[in-house]
Amino acid sequence: MIKVDGLDGRVAVVTGAGRGIGQSLAETFSGNGAQVAAFDLVAPTHEGILGIACDVAQESAVDAAFGQVEAELGTVSVLVLNAGIFPIVPFEETSLEVWERTLSINLTGAFLCARRAVPRMREQSYGRIVAIGSSAGKTGGTKAVAAYAASKAGIMAMAKSIANEYAREGITANALAPTLIDTPMIAGARDLQDKIPVGRFGKPEEVAALVCYLASEHAGYITGEVTDINGGYLID
């Protein structure tokens, strides 16, 4: 596990932390001395981490989850917006239900969590927000992912807006644009591996390492950035 100083004692919330990238994020933060709350629809059970059941698309659930974090761990100073779903549906067959559910989890959920965290960060004059976007938010992705691509473009733009609004208050906000990280979400995409210049899928721990750096005290001069992590798949 990567070691990043500047996280010891910080209270970090990671959404969508039940498995995959989110689990790696939560465990890496914990391994670097942060007190971690892991949100997911079913409360994660990672060792040494506070698992909380939370549907981030529901305002009342977000408020209750943050209230529990504050009561048990303290004031949140790091927020990683990772919760998301990845429906693959041809555009003409995308129902309003699929569209709205995707945006409600991937984008509205991120908004609700960030809006809940920012006032506490302002009180501390310190905060780190990292949004997990996607290269699909830049390119539109492959076929049949319009809802997902739209939601990821939105979360990356939101991070930039937060960065601009709160830079003078010690709060940074950045986003990552990963491509094809080896998680259950892309289990059916093995045929795309040969299209990645480095010749493999990314590892969740590689994403976690970058997020931990952006969430640390060392990254105070980095804000409003969207950082690619894609093995050369998209070079722009």
Image (cartoon, grey):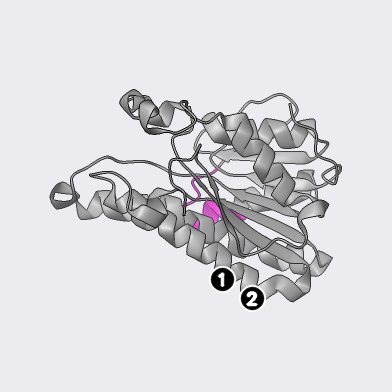
Instruction: Evaluate if marks 1 and 2 touch, with contact meaning CB atoms under 8 Å apart.
Output: yes
Say which of 88 and 200 sits in front.
200
Task: Residue at 66%, 35% (x, y): give it.
Answer: 26
Q: Amino acid at mark 2?
A: Glu
Q: Quadrant of residue 210?
A: top right
Residue 216 point in image, percent of width and height: 78, 49
Task: Characterize the local packing of mark 2: few (<14), some (14-19) or many (20 or more) Cα atoms within 10 angstroms.
Answer: few
- Residue 58 - label: none
As drawn, 159 above or below 33: below
Q: Secondary structure at mark 2?
A: helix
Relative placement, left or right, of 1 versus 16 is right
The reply, left or right, for residue 231 in relation to residue 124 is left
How far apart marks 1 and 2 lie (CA) works out to: 6 Å
Residue pointed to by mark 1: 161
Residue 84 horizontal/vertical position (percent): 45, 44
In reply to whether residue 56 is colored magenta, the answer given is: yes
Looking at the image, is 210 positioned above or below residue 23?
below
- Badge 1 amino acid: Ser
Residue in the image at 43% along x and 49% along y: 135
Q: Is residue 126 magenta?
A: no
Q: Toward which corner of the image does residue 4 lie, by quadrant? A: top right
Identified at 32% across, 53% down, the residue is 140
Circle 2 is placed at which residue position? 165
Q: Which residues are magenta?
A: 54-63
- Location of residue 86 in the rendering, given as x and y in whole percent from the top left corner: 36, 41
Q: Farthest residue to the left: give it.
A: 92
Question: Regarding mark 1 in the picture, which secondary structure is present there?
Answer: helix
For the question of whether residue 108 can be seen, the reply is: no
